[in-house]
Image (cartoon, rainbow, N blue to C red):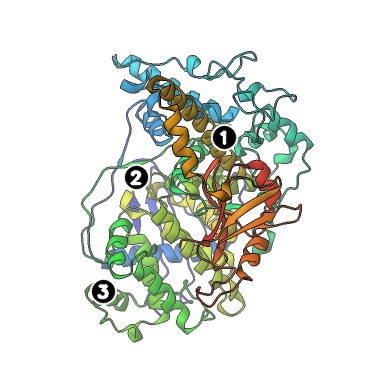
Amino acid sequence: MSWRSGSRGVVLTAYHPSGGAGDAPGGRRSGQYTMNHDHSKKIPDGASFDRSGSQDSLDELSMDDYWKELENIHETRGNNHEERVALVVKEPDEGELEEEWLKEAGLSNLFGESSGDSLESMVFLSTLTRTQKAAVEKRVETVTQTMRKKNKQHQIPDVRDIFRLQNDSKGKVCDGSEPSAVRTSENKNEILDGTKGPKFSLGTDEQKSLLEDMPSSDTDINLEISFAEQAANLKDSSVGKMYKGGGGDTLLPNFRLPKDKTGTTKIGDLAPQDMKKVYSLALIELTALYDILGTEFKQQKAVKIKTKDSGLFGVPLSFLLEQDQKKVPGTKIPLIFQKLIAQIEETTLETEGLLRIPGVATRVKGLCQELEAKFYEGTFNWENVKQHDAASLLKLFIRELPQPLLTVEYLKAFQDVQNLPTRKQQLQALNLLVILLPEANRDTLKVLLEFLQRVIDHRDKNKMTLKNVAMVMAPNLFTFHGFGSKTIEQSEFAMAAGTANVMRFMIQYQKLLWTIPKFIVNQVRKQNTESQKKEKKDKAMKKLLKKMAYDREKHEKQEKTPNDTDVPQGVIRVQAPHLSKVSMAIQLTEELKAGDIVARFLSQKSGNVQTLKKEEVFLYEIGGNIGERCLDHDTYMKDLYQLNPNAEWVIKPKQS
């Protein structure tokens, strides 16, 4: 098999022993992979696949799994006579990439026709860390220079004006307060208007001292301090050395999240309005992290192509979910995806070579066509689907998506994780990338990774270790055929070991990847606090001008319930509209957790109310400096109350 990718290149050859587990079911034969280049070089049998950077060399057996899977993929595509349109990645003009980045980060009003009204962005910018500000500054400077070259007539702010406070120890932000980057130890607990309030760690000078004072472990993932700030402080330190090892499953670090008394925030725990802010902050933070570590971060853009808007395979996730939700309202994972996983698990996960051994190609193709015609009618006979066929269909579904599951925008950033210096930084980058994925992609990826872990849990019988599974799945997620040869195939050999290691990380540390770092949640709280103060000032001015102060105060008093007033210090009022006991005053203690409050309510049972279990209902933090946040049961309530004293507390079932 030969791939052509222009005049540059290297010849790729991968030899496989004849016969073997991959041959019989699908009639596959071992093959040779080549890329045509100026001069040919063969990789001899038994060669090690060493690569620079932090990743371990991968043994020949693991690479053999990778190349066999890649051969199966190309043979499957060769048997599919339908012509598919390649997804063209647009090469952005000078400055266009940075301009798009600023839009994605919610900072489009820093340039263009709306650049004169940048006051709204000042609240957002005032909560950024030093490294985050540097990332924004770099992109604004590029856009500014590009606009000037193109003689754009829009008002262009000088980047020094936008961040004029960054190095000015006596500067004031837009409301007259001191900038966060220059606060002293005496006033670091003050919020921006000079009043006392909850402390939000934002990764500035204050975080430098925290880094120095805080005992750290090589395997502890610090979520309180900006990842880019940590990288900047550790860049020249011996602490940042990579983990060494032979790449075995047991050698991956046992990364863990130290317990946070104010609770761990998972994706899905926050309201949409706060998640929008999380997205913007995660994009800026990821860019800052890549900048600090010297890795280029570029979002890819795909030219729109005509795609199927019905069916199962080759259909965009958004369209697929639309038609699925007509069948099952509220579903977030494609029904065919769920069914294929269930079909694989129905027999047993102990089958040797599960995921690695392909189904028979002609039978898989026939099943695919039959599913397209009968799945939604409910007339498809699943008894005809063998376990290996179902596994092949599952991988086919992922590969045939019109745009990759990891998205056009971020696929390259996922691939580039392998280039980051340390495993901890690779994990931090993956955490931010998962947050940046669209909800449908993220939910589908989560179900996939959970399934892969269940396969690995039976490795004693199925012989599918973490490394084996990663090697088999990496080509399906990372070698997206829609890009064509130029983008992917010319670097296939260089990426093989690296993307497989990224796949290993995604499976091994999947529980950590769906956590929203505390420093980002704190930045959201800070933004909400500043926005509320601005709104109060605006309202006060309107009251004065319209002489409506009395009517507004009267209206506000009418809205208050008896439960909102006269609550003693150290006591919170918890509402539970779905339970028999709908309200309760709770005395806060040092050891009281959110789960204790839920258990207290659930003990008040009534025959008139549907019985709910502790794992089905949660305590929510609503209002104050957060929109809405579902609390994990281990949240210490007194600590959280001190962080958000104006919140309301409600017990309700978690929305799926």
What residue is rendered at 39% in x and 72% in y? 392
Mark sitting on residue 526: 1
Q: CB of mark 2 within 8 Å of CB of mark 3?
A: no
Q: CA distance from mark 1 to mark 3?
A: 47 Å
The x, y position of residue 583, in whole percent, is 58, 59
Residue 52 seen in the current view: yes
Q: In the image, is residue 454 above or below residue 125?
A: below
Q: Tell me the quadrant of the picture where the C terminus can be found.
A: bottom left
The answer to which of marks 1 and 2 sits earlier in the sequence is 2
The answer to which of marks 1 and 3 sits earlier in the sequence is 3
Residues 484 and 459: in front is: 459
Helix or strand or loop: what does disc 3 sit on? loop
The x, y position of residue 322, in whole percent, is 29, 60
Q: CA distance from mark 2 to mark 3?
A: 37 Å
What residue is rendered at 47% in x and 37% in y? 297
Q: CA distance from mark 1 to mark 2?
A: 44 Å
Q: Tell me the quadrant of the picture where the N terminus can be found.
A: bottom left
Residue 629 as seen in the image, left or right of residue 156: right
Helix or strand or loop: what does disc 2 sit on? loop
Q: In the image, is residue 615 above or below residue 288?
A: below
Helix or strand or loop: what does disc 1 sit on? helix
The amino acid sitting under disc 3 is Tyr
Q: Residues within 10 Å of mark 3 (few under 14, many from 20)?
A: some
Name the residue tied to disc 3. 376
What residue is rendered at 55% in x and 78% in y? 462
Q: CB of mark 1 within 8 Å of CB of mark 2?
A: no
